[in-house]
Image (tube, rainbow, N blue to C red):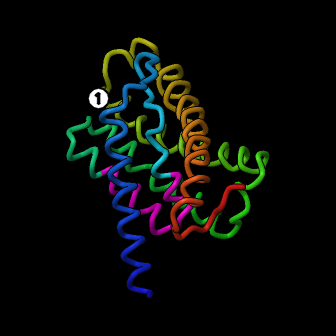
Amino acid sequence: MKRNNKLNSMVISALLCAIGIIIPIISPIKITMEPASFTLASHVAIFIAMFISPTTAIFVSVGTAVGFLLAGFPIVIVFRAASHVIFAVIGSLILKKHPDIIKSIKSAQLFSFGIGLIHGLCEVLVVIPFYFGNNMSSGYYAKGFVTSVILLVGVGTVVHSMIDFYLAQVIWKPVTKAVKIPQQASVN
């Protein structure tokens, strides 16, 4: 029985990893705010992995970052994806300790905002060396540091993260009713 659970977890992790790689590649829903762009639902697989377990969250975060590297995305995007490990682990550990946190709308929004802040901060910290190393597109420099890095990458990531978190909750609820998935967090 334990072997089946491990196999089940591995398959779910691999599927979430594949979804996390495919969505940014094929999604037609990209919101562009020059010089940045945001792909709707690109973090949903990571959030669903957070709902399952810390191990699944780590695997999916690392797997999607490696997928971006292999798909030939710019290195700054690969590092931004790699930074997702941080918010995914923190969020997953919080959910492990407080599995009912996403049951109420208010606590779920506060949790989403907190995770979004961590997510945004990590992405800003990744972009800063590229920005000051003159390794970004000219659009970043045309808009300036505050607009390009702090507002678009930082604040934009917080908003994007919260939208994707909401989408993950909407998807998670019916999926867990239809399929038996090991989980640490549940949505009412």
Exactly how many numbered labels are in the figure? 1
Q: Amino acid at mark 1?
A: Asn
Asked where in the image residue 170 lies, by quadrant, the reply is: top right
Residue 25 point in image, percent of width and height = 30, 35
- Mark 1 is surrounded, within 10 Å at the Cα level, by few (under 14), some (14 to 19) or many (20 or more) other residues, namely some
At a point 42% along the width and 16% down the height, the residue shown is: 34
Asked where in the image residue 56 lies, by quadrant, the reply is: bottom left
User: Which residue ends up furthest to the bottom in the rendered image?
Assistant: 1
User: Which SS class for mark 1?
Assistant: loop
Residue 145 point in image, percent of width and height = 48, 22
User: Which residue ends up furthest to the front in the rendered image?
Assistant: 178
Quarter holding the N terminus is: bottom left
At a point 38% along the width and 45% down the height, the residue shown is: 81
Q: Nearer the viewer, residue 78 or 1?
A: 1
Residue 125 point in image, percent of width and height = 47, 41
Q: Nearer the viewer, residue 26 or 106?
A: 26
At a point 33% along the width and 45% down the height, the residue shown is: 21
SS assignment for the magenta stretch, majority: helix
Q: Which residues are magenta?
A: 47-65
User: Which residue ends up furthest to the top in the rendered image?
Assistant: 142
At a point 63% along the width and 63% down the height, the residue shown is: 185
Q: Tell whether position 127 is magenta.
A: no
Asked where in the image residue 116 lies, by quadrant, the reply is: top right
Residue named by callout 1 = 135
Residue 188 point in image, percent of width and height = 72, 55
Q: Is residue 125 left or right of residue 78?
A: right
Residue 149 vs 49, above or below: the answer is above
